[in-house]
Image (spheres, rainbow, N blue to C red):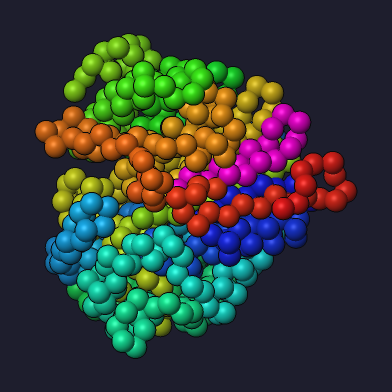
Amino acid sequence: MPDVAIAAPNEAAADAGERIARAGGNAVDAALAAALVTMVNEVGLVSLSSGGFITVQPAGGGAPQTVDGWMDMPGRGRALGGGTWDVDTEYGGGVTVTVGAGSVAAHGSVAAFEEAHRRWGSVPWRDLVTPAIDVARGGFRLSSASRYYLEYVHDDVFGWDDESRAAVHDADGTLTAGLVVMPDLAASLELIAADGAATLHTGRLARLISDDVVRRGGILGAADLADYAPVVRPSLISAVGEWTFGTNPPPSVGGVCVAAMLRLLDGRPHAGWDDDDIAHLVRVQRAVLGHRLDVLDHTDDLVRDAGAFLAMVDRDHLAVLESGSTAHVSATDSEGGACSVTVSSGYSSGMIARGTGIWLNNCLGEQELNPAGLHGLVPGTRLLSNMAPTVGRHADGSALAIGSPGADRITTAIVQVLAGFVNAGLGLQQAVSHPRVHVHRAGRPDEVVKTETDLTMYYGGVAATLRDRDGHLVAAADPRRDGAVRLVHDPASDGADTV
């Protein structure tokens, strides 16, 4: 079996990755198993009704690939509009969330997991799902990230659906401090273990979800789930020194922003982050995030306009700089494979589909990802995404996987960690733990440059793993969240020690 390093959002997810690695699984197997557990126990952040991306650096040294399992716009053959309402929250400094059955998009993460497993996995599919079944059946306590979010929205978002309210509240109406047990969710996971992603698209779970959504005024019908398919694309490539990074290509906008920022940083910081480096970082974020708000979020051809933007970045750095809820798992293995997985259910629609135990997403109601407005896209169109799961390969054979949750802070968190690690020579954990800067509403009259003083989950939750040139494994989890790491060692090899 290969040695495997895993960085995950919580201990149960890391345990799942370790369990699969000890059964002979590689980086892809371990990352997928850990991510499936987050779909159970990261309530409010991610669920089986989620979308996501998996970026893989194959162990044989081939070009990185990204599996797109992000959300589709539903509504085939239906009148669009309705089935939603807005909730104003103080979360993240003030966010308006659109919830209700009409906010539910067509999920795709499990289908993408299945495709990644088919291409690069090495242990049976059922084995990957079993740890998530065990967590759902045995119960779990809310993670600190879940609790932080739910403290703001447990009544307004998670309180309107009776089953949802009962799951996260104690009898007195307060957010639960006890175990959350989801027997219907365990049964749903058993179906996924037996039948694969098909049950979520053409089988029993698909029927239960679409029937309940439509009955409550939503637009996610059976045809929307049946017609869904993950897409495998070559990753978007950027070279930084002797590292070659692959990240999420269009139609996700997150990878484009990561690639542009890495190129514009131009090797900074050269040592530690000094004031001049931070000022340059702010200029880079302002240029890239401002271009996103002005152009990329509104384009009718993201592939074309993203390509033109990156070409301009490569051609003339100066011209660019002077112009105007989520979970992540990373894993690498001793064979040189790396896998980066980011998944999200948005802020949650607040409803559990009857008979499934599955909290449904509200990705149609994430207003920052829907610049065309609620139900403004053609059914079957992929939604925008901030996600940017990233892998890297060094000229010396080192392999790295990195990613983060955090909405529009995903890209800035990843870039700052990579810059600290690759350019400044910081250790991987030191780079992850370093304070961050984020330009909010870049280039707008209400722009704010937010500088981190105390570490908080607002600035992301980076998970990163590394196989160095000597074959040793390193895993780094973000202290901003309940991150957990595992290094799994094959006693027959000379690799990393087990932690």
> With respect to residue 449, does 148 lie above or below?
below
Q: Residue at x 85, y 51 (%)?
A: 491
State the residue lying farthest toward the left.
445
> With respect to residue 160, does 387 lie above or below?
above
Q: Is residue 473 magenta?
A: yes
Quarter location, residue 32: bottom right
Q: Name the residue nearer the viewer: 388 or 236.
A: 388
Residue range in magenta is 461-476
State the residue lying farthest toward the bottom.
171
Q: Name the residue nearer the viewer: 470 or 452.
A: 452
Count of numbered marks: 0
> With respect to residue 222, does 56 lie above or below?
above
Q: Residue at x 66, y 66 (%)?
A: 127
Q: Residue at x 64, y 57 (%)?
A: 17
| Residue 189 image offset from top left, x and y in percent | 53, 73
**Can residue 484 be seen from the camera position used here?**
yes
Quarter location, residue 48: bottom left
| Residue 58 image offset from top left, x and y in percent | 64, 38
State the residue lying farthest toward the right.
492
| Residue 181 image offset from top left, x and y in percent | 48, 81
> With respect to residue 126, does 160 lie above or below?
below
**Can residue 305 be seen from the camera position used here?**
no
State the residue lying farthest toward the front.
453
| Residue 497 image offset from top left, x and y in percent | 77, 47
Q: In the figure, is residue 243 to the left or right of 474?
A: left
Q: Is residue 497 magenta?
A: no
Q: Name the residue nearer the viewer: 295 or 35.
A: 35
Q: In the figure, is residue 114 to the left or right of 327?
A: right
Q: In the figure, is residue 110 to the left or right of 306?
A: right
Q: Residue at x 42, y 37 (%)?
A: 435
